[in-house]
Image: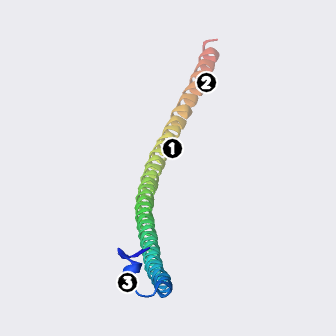
Amino acid sequence: MSINGKIITDLFPSNPDRQRETAIQKASEVNVVDIEKYIERLDQDRRESEQRIRDERKESEDRIRNERKESEKYWQIQRDKDHDYYIKLCDRLDEDRKLSEERLEKKFDQAINDIRTSKYWIMGVCFATILGIAAMVVAILVGS
């Protein structure tokens, strides 16, 4: 057996039984120390891995939070644009409706004026027809 490259029998040359016990004890101590160092390294690696996972999770959560905020901003801007568009559309439709009402009102007023004017012409034609018939009756009565 060897400890750190030295042969155990070289350490205690006088008593072979004592040498053997000491060698076993030293080998056990070396193994325990190596195992403790290995376990410490494993614990350190585990802690570093856990910390790295926590950091990555936090970065991921921050990224998701920022993306959500950016998405909310984008959709808020889109809603505002749509709102402005629909308000302008409603205003334009209201103006078109008012213009149509004004045109219809003018046409209606013109139709009423045409009817009034036509009424006088119709009355004039009726009056002229009645006078013509009366003149023909008078002419027939006078000529007979």
Name the side, left or right, on which 11 lies relative to 39. left
Look at the numbered discs 1 and 3 and tell me whether their residues touch, using CB distance below 8 Å. Answer: no
Look at the numbered discs 2 and 1 and tell me whether their residues touch, using CB distance below 8 Å. Answer: no
In this view, the residue in front, 69 or 47, is: 47
How far is disc 2 from disc 1 in space, using C-alphas?
38 Å
How far is disc 1 from disc 3 in space, using C-alphas?
128 Å
How far is disc 2 from disc 3 in space, using C-alphas?
165 Å
Name the side, left or right, on which 131 lies relative to 35. right
In this view, the residue in front, 41 or 116, is: 41
Up the image or down, 60 lies above or below 40; here it is above
Q: Residue furthest left?
A: 5
Number of the label disc, if any, that sits on residue 108: 1
Q: Which x, y percent locates residue 136?
A: 60, 18
Tell me the residue that label 2 is attached to: 134
Tell me the residue that label 3 is attached to: 11
Residue at 64 percent across and 17 percent down: it is 141
SS at circle 1: helix
In this view, the residue in front, 6 or 132, is: 6
Residue at 47 percent across and 50 percent down: it is 97
Q: Residues within 10 Å of mark 3 (few under 14, many from 20)?
A: few
Name the side, left or right, on which 65 lies relative to 5. right
In this view, the residue in front, 2 or 62, is: 2
- Under mark 3, the amino acid is Leu
Image quadrant occupied by the N terminus? bottom left
SS at circle 3: helix
